Image (spheres, helix red, strand yellow):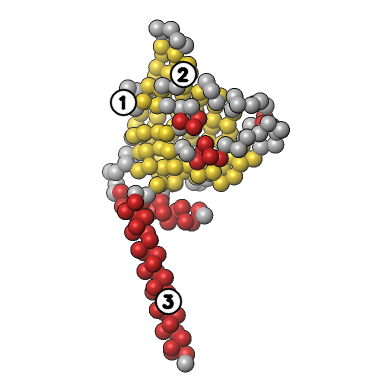
Amino acid sequence: MRKILGAIAMAGCMMTGANATIVYQFQVTSMECSGSHCEDWSSELNSLTISMSAPIGELNVRTVDWGTPIESTQYYNSNIVAVDFAALDIFVNMQEGRCESPVLCEMVATLQANDGYLQGIIRTLSTMYADTFMSTNGSDLWSGYLNSDRGPTTPDNRPIYSGVWYAVPEPGALALLGVGLVGMVGVRQRRRTAAVAAST
């Protein structure tokens, strides 16, 4: 599975070019939880995407709004074009430089692209789903945890997961990859046929 994702990611990177926006999507590879109230968050985590305009990106946004005229917002962004963390109740408005989730919303990300994959650290905090954390440690494999207000958040009810952030190719990249694979199959078949003919 990882080799397939890698091939697709590399095809996408070749097609998009150095200065193009690249979309990365999270893919859960494992999830563990030993508590009696554990939930499988694979579908929510697999829906997360980050779009970057350069190989290195950083985002730091925190908005607090308790329903009064007083609102606090901090915002810093470098090369992050868009994030889709709606499944974790994180809604970042890049144009206005604020987080639009109710009451409390925070997202901190430091990212670096490497051969079609992302490395780095991501932390989110929201009123509805408490907090999530994921990071890498010298490889493309991310590991992290998720505290959910949907159930008890004791340590044995906190999902622990791992996965990868891979580059999502444009449709043209997929077509190019398909043509390449068909060509490879054709070359291998011709070699096999030639070898059989030579041995008879």
Observer able to see residue 137? no
Q: Is residue 77 left or right of residue 156?
A: left
Q: Going from the N terminus, do you reach mark 2 or mark 1 first?
A: 1
- Whichever of callouts 3 and 1 sits on the residue coming sooner in the sequence is 1
What residue is rendered at 41% in x and 11% in y?
A: 71
Indicate the amino acid at tag 3: Gln
Q: Horizontal placement of 11 versus 86: left or right?
A: left
Residue type pointed to by label 2: Pro
In front of the other: 175 or 2: 175
Q: Which residue is mark 2?
A: 102
Res 94 → quadrant: top left
**Residue at image mark 3:** 189
Disc 2 element? loop
Mark 3, Cα crowd under 10 Å, few <14 / some 14-19 / many 20+, is few
Q: Earlier in the sequence, mark 2 or mark 3?
A: 2
The reply to whether dot 2 and dot 1 touch (C-beta < 8 Å) is no
Residue at image position (43%, 38%) is 49
Is residue 110 among the parts visible in the rendering?
A: yes
Residue type at mark 1: give it: Gln
Q: CA distance from mark 2 to mark 1?
A: 18 Å
* Disc 1 target residue: 95
Q: Nearer the viewer, residue 28 or 77?
A: 28
Residue 124 x/y as whole percent: 49, 28
Res 184 → quadrant: bottom left
Residue placed most toward the observer, 159 or 86 = 86
State if disc 1 and disc 3 touch (CB < 8 Å): no
Distance from Cα at disc 3 to Cα at disc 1: 53 Å
Which structural element holds mark 1?
Answer: loop
* Residue at the bottom extreme, as displayed: 200
Q: Is residue 127 depicted above or below 6 in this figure?
A: above
